[in-house]
Image (cartoon, rainbow, N blue to C red):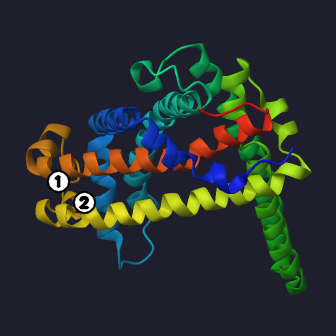
Amino acid sequence: MIFPATDCAFEGFRLTRRAPVAVLLWAAAYAVFFGLLFLLVGSHFATILSMVSQMEGQAEPSLEEMQPLMQAYGVIVAWAAPLGLLFSAVISTAIARSVIRPEDRKFGYMRVGKDELRVLGASLIVALIMFGVTVVGFMLVSLVAALAMTAPALWLAVVLLSLALLAVAIWLSVRLSLVVPATFAEGRIAVKSAFAMTGQKTFWPLFGMAIIAWVMAMLVGLLGSAVAAPLSLMVGGAERLVGMEGASVPSLLSALGPMLAVSLVVNAVMSAAQIVIMYAPFSAAYLHLRGASRA
């Protein structure tokens, strides 16, 4: 079954017009998430910015010099990865709910329940599939690149393998793009059925829809950045974090409160706007492929 890809690509804008309060609540949820993450790892983020700034223009740093940087990255990832996965499941399920069951408006379509847990499980499966394919492909490319050091003719194979890996990653991303709406709508982890829905007849329309949605999200991001730039200049940019290596979160809040507040609001609003534009089209496409009507 063919669906109207261009029409579905604009579902995010229709959703914003249809449920503006929900989108504002999602922005508020992003603000809470970013704020919580800063409270947990803000000092490590300042350490990274300070060290990167200090290393600019210097010779290749030693392992000892890199160790604090890697430790700071490790702490950030240790907190951001699980919290980010859970938060992403809540927001992506809310967007799917707003398109597939628009009458269920309570709490801005956000919940923490079985639907979200199923979406979290499905998202983890997709992430593991993509990670596995990427790692295997990267290992193969690296092996051929190592052989090419002694046989220059193999560099063509390295290029072709790299392009093939990119093509496989794009193909898989499109084939698995309906996992979240399918999992929500069917009340089960629906990786297999979502994969089956995105076959030859629907692959290219879905791919085109994704490109349109991505371009529009980037344009919205650029517009938002242009609007936010004067505010950032008024309160100072993130470069003010440089030189505050090892500072505690209370010290950062005391010294950089206005800058952090503006950054929090801007990033929350832009993240909510972009995620709606990029995610909503796939739920609309799912409804069309299932022969259901949209509100």
90 or 149, nearer to the observer: 90
Which mark identifies residue 238?
2
- How packed is label 2: few (under 14 Cα within 10 Å), some, or many (20 or more)? some
Residue at 57% across, 22% down: 116
Q: Is residue 272 left or right of residue 173?
A: left
Q: Residue furthest bottom?
A: 152
- What amino acid type is highlighted by mark number 2? Ala
Identify the mark nearer the N-term, 2 or 1: 2
Which mark identifies residue 259?
1
Q: Is residue 169 visible?
A: no
Give the percent coordinates (x, y) of residue 61: 42, 69
Residue 96: name its quadrant: top right
Residue 56: name its quadrant: bottom left
Q: Is residue 30 left or right of residue 96?
A: left
- How packed is label 1: few (under 14 Cα within 10 Å), some, or many (20 or more)? many
Residue at 51% across, 37% down: 81
Give the percent coordinates (x, y) of residue 150: 85, 81
Residue at 54% across, 14% down: 113
Q: Is residue 111 visible?
A: yes
99 or 223, nearer to the observer: 99
